Amino acid sequence: MTNKKQESEQEQLDEAHYRAWHLARSPHEAISTEYEWSVLRFQQAFERWITQLADITGLAELSYIEIIIMHVIRMQDRPKTAASIARQLNRDDIPNIQYCLRKLVKMDLCQKITESGNKTTAFEVTEKGKQMTDRYAEVRRQILTEQTKNIDRVDEKLREATQMISLLTGLYDEAGRITASYSPFNSDK
């Protein structure tokens, strides 16, 4: 069988799978939609993992986003502003990030830093926060990253996946900007 014929037969089989799905009217749409659904499932598994790991390492009182913000603040052990945290996480809800930061300060996991002559407030992890995030990192290392080493060429695959997701993040952000200029669909007209 030639490659063209095999591809045509495979496309026909795939069509039977996605034909009735409103999000997938072509092979490309089907693959794109399957990718989106896999990202959604991955995000849910990732969030579950993060919160379960936090539970066993003493951070059970924190929500998923608060745990993530703790790790962003700890990144390179340099103070971060709410805006820089938002930028790192590709979020635009700074008030929610500020709420999380107030909670982390109240729990003595991070503290405010205001440089003299600068009106900007940054946050850094406290000693208690460092101990907690160190414990988290150690358990993560034991349970997760030691297992991923068993995947053939894992570092290469992770690097490629990271590049692809970064590229697609830009495309989705651009698509979001484009839709901002569209009028909402009104079925009454």
Image (cartoon, rainbow, N blue to C red):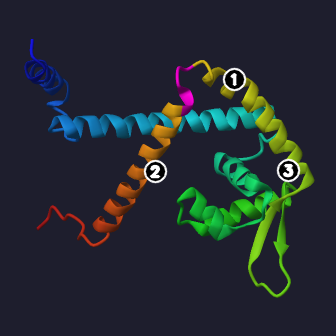
Residue furthest to the bottom? 117
Q: Is residue 79 left or right of 49 when viewed as pictured? A: right
Tell me which label, 2 or 3, sits earlier in the chain.
3
Q: Is residue 14 left or right of 118 when viewed as pictured? A: left
Tell me which label, 2 or 1, sits earlier in the chain.
1
Q: Which residue is mark 2?
A: 166
Whether 92 is drawn above or below 77: the answer is below
Numbered marks: total? 3
The magenta segment: 151-155
Indicate which disc residue 129 carries: 3
Packing grade of label 3 (10 A; few <14, some 14-19, many >=20) is many
Q: Are marks 3 and 1 in contact (CB under 8 Å)?
A: no
Quarter of image, res 73 = bottom right
- Indicate the secondary structure of the residue bearing disc 1: helix
Q: Are marks 2 and 3 in contact (CB under 8 Å)?
A: no
Q: Which residue is mark 1?
A: 146
Residue 5 location, x and y as percent?
A: 7, 19
Q: Residue at x 31, y 60 (%)?
A: 175
In three-dimensional space, the C-alpha distance between marks 2 and 3, rounded to whole angstroms, equals: 29 Å
Q: Residue at x 41, y 34 (%)?
A: 38
Residue 150 location, x and y as percent?
A: 60, 18
The foreground one among 77 and 172 is 77
Position of the C terminus, as image quadrant, is bottom left
Please, what is the three-letter code of the amino acid marked with disc 2?
Ser
Whether 172 is drawn above or below 13: the answer is below
Tell me which label, 3 or 1, sits earlier in the chain.
3
The foreground one among 150 and 182 is 150
Q: Main secondary structure of the magenta part?
A: loop
Q: Are marks 2 and 1 in contact (CB under 8 Å)?
A: no
Please, what is the three-letter code of the amino acid marked with disc 1?
Glu
